[in-house]
Image (spheres, rainbow, N blue to C red):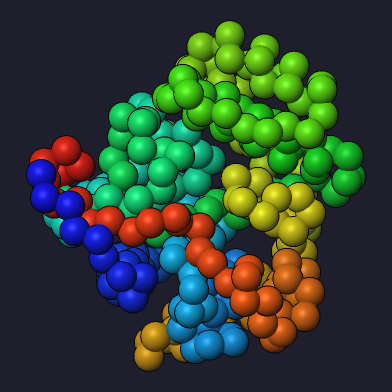
Amino acid sequence: MSITKISLKEMQQQEFEILCELDRICTAYKITYYLTAGTLLGAIRHKGFIPWDDDIDVAMPLKDYRKFTQICQRELATDYFFQDWKTEKNYPFHFAKIRKNGTNDGVTFLQKIEMHHGISIDIFPLEACPKRDWFAKLLFKITEFSTYALLKKGDKTFSHCFQKKYERIIFRLLQWVPKKGLLFFREGVCRIVSIFCSNQRLCTSGGGHGYPYETYKAEWFSKTVFVTFENRTFPAPKEWDALLSHMYGDYQILPPKEKRRGHIEEHFDKIGKENKKK
C-alpha cells in the first residue's frame, strides 16, 4: 500500500467536499443542520476554515439527526461511508461521521481500532439537556466515560490521564462491562434525557469541548441564517454570536501562535482496500 502525506489544505479540501455532499442530501430532504464549533467560528472570522483547523463540525436537531442517519446510508455517494455505532461495531463515539473511502485521516490514537479511518466530518445530535447543572454534568460524564471505555475495548493500549482517583476507578470498572452494555447504557441514558427533559436547553454531549461549553439555549437555534464558508453559503444558528461567545469567549481574538494547531497530528492519504466500504 502506498502512503502519501498530504497537506493541511488538501485535507481541508476533501473535508469541504464531504460537507457539500451532506448539504446536498439535507437540502433534498429538508433536513435541518447547522455549522457549529470551530467550523462556525471559521465561517464568521475567516469566511472559511480557521487556517490551522483540520476538521468540520455540524449539528442537527435530534429529529433531523435520526432522519439523516436513515436517509444518508442510501443516498450518500459511493465515494463516502456513513459511520456511527450502528453501522460499524467498533465505532466508539456518540456522534456520527461521513468518511471518504480510500483515505486515512491520520488520527494516531484511533489507528489500532478496527474500523474505517477515512478523512471525515463530524455530525452531532442536538439533544435535550437537563436544566439542573449537576444533572447536565452527570450526562456529560456518562457520555465521556462510556466512550473512553469503548475506546479501550477497541484498543487495549489506549489510556487516558484521569486527574481524580474516583475517575480512574470508574474507568477500570467500566472495562469489565461488555461493549453492548456500554452502548446500551450510554445511548439509553441520552434517549431518556431527550424524552423527559424540556428542549429549552440543548447539548452535544459527545463533543470534545465538554461541559459547559457544549450546552446551549434552544432559542439560539430557533431560526436559521446563512453564512459564507469557503465561497459557499451554509446554514448557521441565528444567534451564532451568543453561541460562539459561550464556547470561546472573545472569539475574534486569535489564539497565541503556539496554540494554533488542529486536532490531527499528521495527515496521510492511504490509498488501498483496507478502508474501502462497498
Q: Residue furthest front?
A: 258
Q: Nearer the viewer, residue 104 or 278?
A: 104
- Please provide percent x and percent y for residue 267: 33, 59
Q: Residue furthest top?
A: 176
Q: Is residue 191 left or right of residue 183?
A: right
Q: How many marks?
A: 0
Instruction: Report whether residue 250 is seen.
Output: yes
**Which residue is located at x 33 percent, y 53 percent?**
105
Q: Quadrant of the N terminus?
A: top left
Instruction: Report whether residue 242 is seen.
Output: no
**Which residue is located at x 39 percent, y 85 percent?**
230
Residue 42 higher or lower than 30, as above or below:
below
**Which residue is located at x 74 percent, y 59 percent?**
213
Residue 30 higher or lower than 275, as above or below:
below
- Please provide percent x and percent y for residue 200: 78, 58
Residue 143 higher or lower than 61, as above or below:
above
**Which residue is located at x 60 percent, y 45 percent?**
206
- Please provide percent x and percent y for residue 48: 46, 83
Q: Is residue 222 left or right of residue 180?
A: right
Q: Is residue 133 left or right of residue 6?
A: right
Q: Quadrant of the C terminus?
A: top left
Q: Is residue 76 left or right of residue 253?
A: left
- Please provide percent x and percent y for residue 139: 74, 37
Quadrant of the image occupied by residue 217: bottom right
